[in-house]
Image: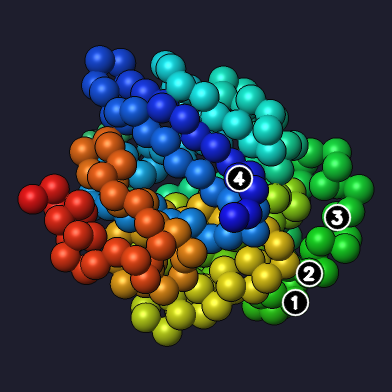
């Protein structure tokens, strides 16, 4: 069994008096792709935002590479090796493609290797090099998603959090994006992937967690879980 890189233990998260995550535990082993599936409002983004330091758990523990990190600020998470591609991409539309990528390497460790990492990202997404001086608002949806992933890679993460990277994209574009997830994984980067598309998610991951109403309802390797169990956990019926 591979070593856990990320270990989330029994976290509870609230938005004021709304209890969004209930006793959530999850592990991402080194070098694996783990996915979280669940319907709208299941708590998937809340969980990723908590791991990324955007939200704080009210109780529970988050460990990254055996270091306790819950309560840290997002920039500290990035410096430690966790970076996130947020839902809806959140690129800076009035900055150029290159300026957006630069925003991803503000931590000193990443800045030192900026040219080397940029070259790799351009190899992964050649279109970003072609468009590097264009305002990012002029990119297509798929290209913007590539930019969001590229920006997250600029900090040279050990773990990348991907929140619904296929949302609103055409099937062929989604296929290309998932191809790059494979490449990212082959570089040794672990990934925690959030998806609504069950089949897409099962194909891409080594382990899956099914969330519903703020709780983990099911977990296992894709081959071990029956479609029926997944469907039940997903819809909570
Ligand atoms: N800022 C907020 N304030 C209050 N409640 C929130 C806030 N953000 C999310 N929620 C609630 O928390 C629950 C989980 O939301 P979350 O965005 O994590 O779900 P999700 O699984 O990512 O859904 P989707 O697939 O639609 O992105 C939902 O009931 C949502 O309404
Ligand atoms: Mg979400």
> Mark on residue 165?
none
Q: Which mark is residue 114?
A: 3
Earlier residue among tags 3 and 1: 3
Q: Is residue 132 visible?
A: no
Q: Label 1, on which residue?
A: 123
User: In the figure, is residue 152 to the left or right of 20?
Assistant: right
At horizontal 38% and vertical 56% (from top left) the residue drawn is 220
Query: In x, y percent, where is residue 144?
Result: 53, 64
Do tag 2 and tag 1 residues touch (Cβ < 8 Å)? yes
Which residue position is annotated with label 2?
120
Gap between marks 4 and 3, in whole Å?
28 Å
Of the image marks 2 and 3, the number of the one nearer the N terminus: 3
Image location of residue 105, percent across then percent down: 76, 47
Residue plotted at (77% across, 41% down)? 106
Ligand 1 resides in the quarter of the picture at top left
82 is higher (above) or lower (below) than 148: above
């Amino acid at each position: 069994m591979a070593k856990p890189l990320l270990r989330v233990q029994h976290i509870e998260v609230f938005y004021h008096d709304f209890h969004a995550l209930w006793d959530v535990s999850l592990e991402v082993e080194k070098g694996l792709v783990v996915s979280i599936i669940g319907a709208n409002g299941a708590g998937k983004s809340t969980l990723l935002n908590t791991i990324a330091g955007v939200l704080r758990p009210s109780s529970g523990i988050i460990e990254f590479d055996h270091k306790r990190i819950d309560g840290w600020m997002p920039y500290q998470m990035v410096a430690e090796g966790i970076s996130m591609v947020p839902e809806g991409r959140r690129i800076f539309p009035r900055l150029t493609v290159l300026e957006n990528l630069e925003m991803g390497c503000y931590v000193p460790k990443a800045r030192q290797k900026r040219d080397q990492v940029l070259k790799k990202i351009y190899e992964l997404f050649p279109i970003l090099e072609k468009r590097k001086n264009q305002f990012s608002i002029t990119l297509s949806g798929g290209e913007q998603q590539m930019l969001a992933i590229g920006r997250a890679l600029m900090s040279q993460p050990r773990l990348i959090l991907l929140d619904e990277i296929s949302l609103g994209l055409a099937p062929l574009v989604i296929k290309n994006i998932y191809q790059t997830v494979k490449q990212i994984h082959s570089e040794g980067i672990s990934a925690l992937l959030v998806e609504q598309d069950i089949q897409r998610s099962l194909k891409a991951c080594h382990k899956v967690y099914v969330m519903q109403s703020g709780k983990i309802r099911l977990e296992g390797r894709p081959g071990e879980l029956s479609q029926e169990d997944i469907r039940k956990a997903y819809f909570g019926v």
